[in-house]
Image (cartoon, helix red, strand yellow):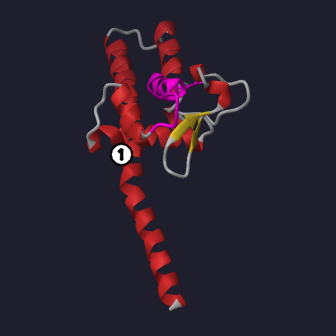
Amino acid sequence: MAEALTWVMQRRMVLVEHAEQPRKEPAETEAEVARLEVAEVVIGQFIEAERFGEADDPVMDAELERVTAAPGAGGMLLVPLREDGMGTDHLPADYRAVVEVVARAAETVKAGQVSESLGKGTLPGQVESVRAKLKRLAERGWLHRTPAGRYVPLPSLRT
């Protein structure tokens, strides 16, 4: 009978991991789309500058440096690992908004509550991107995720 219990527990763990995969993929796809959008803008600007003979324009060079050195470009972490003394100003605006909603909450919050507070809605498709952001923020030390899957701010981020 112990083997049956072990088999059931292992099977459950495999299925939980399998169920998590579709939740991870949209966030990864979203990050890749953002990188491609930036590349499209930069390449378009370069083509336009070449057309007008301004490809070596210092202003364009500065803009290219700004875009390619931004978080999320070239494999840089969009959400950095949190270190002591770091404020939410190190986060992209959409992640900062998520942290601020959690920080204002009087108690632990679920992804659906955060999504609703951000005006995104509570349908599964609307909540998934917020859930992915919450998980990433928790993994990188910006929030704490409870065993029940709710989120609380770290004491230093509470407003």
The residue at 44%/71% (across/down) is 12
Q: Quadrant of residue 35?
A: top left
Q: Tag 1: residue type?
A: Pro
Q: Residue furthest front?
A: 106
The residue at 54%/26% (across/down) is 103
**Over which residues does the magenta segment extend?**
90-109
Q: How far from the left and from the top, in percent, is residue 141?
A: 63, 38
The residue at 47%/22% (across/down) is 93
Residue identifier under label 1: 26
> Visible in this render: residue 141?
yes
Q: How far from the left and from the top, in percent, is residue 34?
A: 39, 32
Q: Quadrant of residue 117?
A: top left
User: Above or below — where is 33 with respect to 43?
Assistant: below
The residue at 38%/60% (across/down) is 19
User: Above or below — where is 142 with respect to 19?
Assistant: above
User: Does residue 4 belong to the magenta stretch?
Assistant: no
> Visible in this render: residue 34?
no
